[in-house]
Structures are given as C-alpha cells and as structure tokens.
Image (tube, rainbow, N blue to C red):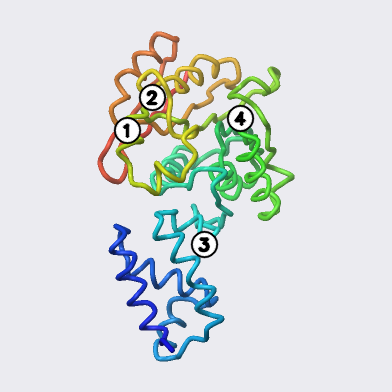
Amino acid sequence: MLTVLEVIKKTAEFLASKGVESPRLNAETLVGHALSLTRMKLYLQFERTLTEGELEVIRPLVRRRSQREPLQYILGHVEFFSVTLKVDKRALIPRPETEYLLELIKEKYLSQTPSMILDLGTGTGAIALALAKHFLSSHVTAVDTSHEALALASENIQALGLSERVTPLLSNWFDAVPKTQRFDLIISNPPYLTSEEVEKTMPEVNKHEPHSALIASEDGLYDIKIILTQAPYFLSSGGLIALETGESQHQAIQALATQLGYAHFSSSKDLAGKDRFVFIAM
C-alpha cells in the first residue's frame, strides 16, 4: 500500500502532466480534504499507509481536478473577505480582485456606514455577505437573474445567519427592484469579458464557470451600460456606484458616465496594477 507522501507525489506528477498550476499544492489540498486533515496534520502523517477505502475517496477528487475542474468547486467552499462561502458550478468563484474592491469600499466608508446596499449580480452572495459582515447596520439586497445562482446565494445567506439583513432578489439587474427603494451603495462585479477573452482563459474558467456571468456583448460593456443608465433612479442622494470592470474599459465607461450626467468618476487599479475598478456618483 502507498503512504500519504507517496500518494501526494504521484498525484502532483499526474496533475502536472495535465497542466494544472501548482500541482504539489493542489495534491496536498485534495489529499488533505479527502482525509479531513489540515495541511499541518497531513505533514505529520506523511509516512502513514493509506487504506483502500481512503484511496477510493481520493481518486475521484484527483480525476476531477485533472479535468481542470476548479479546486474550489471540488472542495465546495472558498474563503472570501473573512467569510466562508459555499461554491459550486451555479456561480462564479469569488476572486481576490473583488476582495480588493471591498477593501477600497471600506476606505471610502471609514466615517459612515451605507445604510442600504444593492449588490447586482450577486452570484454566490460574496459581495453582499462580506459587506453585511463588515457594515453591521447595513441592509443588503442581493440581486441575480440566475435562479441557480440565487439559490446558492440564499444557501450562503442562511449558513452565515444573515437572512435578517441580506435579502436575495431574483431580478434582471434593476427590473424587480422596487422603484421606491434608494441605495447608498450600488455595487457590482458584472459580466465584462468578450467571448474571445473567455476563450483565452484557463480551462478552469472557460470550461467550468458559467459564461453568462463572464461574457457581455458590446466589447464587454453591455451590462455595465444597463447599470449606469438605470442606477440614478435607485441611488440615494450622495450615493455611490462601485464596479469591477475590464482593464481596457475605463475610458469608455467614463465617457458614458459623463454622457449620462454623472458628476464624479474615479478609477482604481487592482493589485496587479491593472485598471479594474470605477467609482461613480451623481
């Protein structure tokens, strides 16, 4: 029989042959997950011989990863801005770039708290739930047009005990949002890639994550245009729009914001130095 270390080495070699990045880390994570062991506890058991039953648990996980299914989908959860979220193929995996957007939001609200927040295209509920956890007096409406994604967000809302302050809403952007509601912060990570850009992404993205949450027409600007056109009817006085965008879109977005009568526009880079976020206000 094989030891834990031998299985990890063989798994890493197999994953490397399939083009998986960081194959050793992936192997350790998968084996640890299968055995319900943290990486530290896994290291302490390197010389232990695995049973056939344990190997039977590990094999299908490795097979899935070798087919380039995202590691997060296999594990079934991800850490995002200090909250643990259930993730699966119903929605995009929350990205570190989006965590940085929330860091920027925190800086903008150091002396006040946005009372009403609208998260458009909530997916897993990541943005809505992270903001609700940080802004303890805020109420967040989490919108998605996908029944499946909203079901996943609802599961996360319940799991985190935030159902009193985070409300899921099935809506195509603003369509089902009550017209009497006003929001201090409207935030979104909308689809902003072209189909050509998605084709060039890694298999984990283009073969496994929902394209409807990635791709927008009109050079990736279609959904951003809808948001900016309709948002003024739902913004409170002094309210802010915060968007994650494509790195080459800021000039076009600023021109649209000016055309629509917005008075304030600012652009911020992500941690890789790429134009990624815009902040817009009336």
N-terminal label among 4 and 3: 3
Q: Report the side of 259 relative to 188 (left or right).
A: left
Q: Residue under circle 4? A: 145
Q: Residue at x 44, y 19 (%)?
A: 222
N-terminal label among 3 and 1: 3
Residue 175 image label? none
Residue 220 image label? 2
Residue 75 image label? 3
In front of the other: label 1 or label 4? 1
Of helix, strand and loop, which one carries label 3? helix
Q: Are marks 2 and 1 in contact (CB under 8 Å)?
A: yes
* Quadrant housing residue 193: top left
N-terminal label among 1 and 4: 4
Tell me how far mark 1 sits from mark 4, CA to CA.
23 Å
Amino acid type, residue under disc 3 in the picture:
Leu
- Label 3, residues with CA under 10 Å away: few <14, some 14-19, many ≥20: some
Q: Are marks 2 and 4 in contact (CB under 8 Å)?
A: no
Amino acid type, residue under disc 2 in the picture:
Gly
Of helix, strand and loop, which one carries label 1? helix
Residue at the far left: name it.
Answer: 273
Residue at the far right: name it.
Answer: 164
Q: Residue under circle 1? A: 197
In the image shown, does 244 or 235 lie closer to the viewer? 244
Tell me how far mark 2 sits from mark 4, CA to CA.
18 Å
Q: Report the side of 78 relative to 202 (left or right).
A: right
